[in-house]
Amino acid sequence: MINNHQPIAILGGMGPDASARLYQLMIELSRSEFGAVENHQYPEIVIDSVPVPEFFSNTQKAEEAKLMLKDRVRKLNYLQPGCFSLACNTAHTILMDLELETLVPFVSIPEEVSREVKQKEYKRVGLLASPTTIFAGIYQAELSDKNIEVVLPDNGYIEELGEIIGQIVGGEFKQSKTSLLKIANSLKKKKVEALILGCTELPLVFPKNYSLPILNTLEILGRALLKRYYRKEEI
């Protein structure tokens, strides 16, 4: 049996640990939810780990990052992927610019998270994300259309989230976990029903047994990409 599915193209490297975990997670989900057993049954995944400058808290670097990512989209077009995705929530702030470089659809993390929040019937969710993602309002816009309230951390904590994400990118997991839990607990006190881990670095350190439901954007993205791959679902 020949696998005739079109490949999944992922722009990653933002940061690299998150992209590596996404790939691993997609292989695990291929087995557990899509029945992959033999080698040819696993998805064809192309990950371009792009070393963009840090722009999750420094928006001055966004233009340089955008130019690099637009270039990679143009190059990946030659592989004729079935879909593109970004293994980074913050990069979705420039998604519209990237979509201009291809006719291939992007699977959007905020859109997929929004669907899941709606499906679970949450009305008030907390957002843990980079300063750039929070201030760009991509989750607020997506969820407000569905009458879902997004609760943000206090301003001081937003800046601290940028530092935490930088620590995770640098491989400092223990201290970042402690700081992240402090901010999560502050949102819990605001009576949210669930927490969105709106940065793909955060699931690398966030505990799986937290006292509130967690919307893991890495897992949500991985599952959405596989549904598209195996079932040819429309975006």
Image: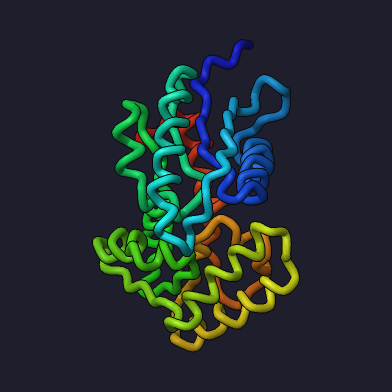
From the viewer's side, name the closer residue of 17 and 228: 17
Q: Residue furthest bottom?
A: 189
Residue 78 position (above or below residue 83): above
Residue 180 falls left or right of residue 77: right
Residue 222 falls left or right of residue 152: right
Colour scheme of this structure image? rainbow
Q: Residue furthest right?
A: 174
Q: Residue at x 67, y 71 (%)?
A: 176
Q: How many marks?
A: 0
Residue 123 falls left or right of residue 176: left
Residue 30 position (above or below residue 94): above
Q: Position of residue 26 (x, y in %)?
A: 62, 40
Q: Quadrant of residue 139?
A: bottom left
Q: Position of residue 112 (x, y in %)?
A: 41, 50
- Quarter in which the C terminus is drawn: top left
Q: Residue at x 50, y 38 (%)?
A: 225
Q: Residue at x 67, y 50 (%)?
A: 17
From the viewer's side, name the closer residue of 199 and 114: 199
Q: Residue at x 31, y 69 (%)?
A: 148
From the viewer's side, name the closer residue of 234 and 157: 157
Q: Position of residue 7 (x, y in %)?
A: 52, 24
- Quarter in which the N terminus is drawn: top right
Residue 126 position (above or below residue 103): below
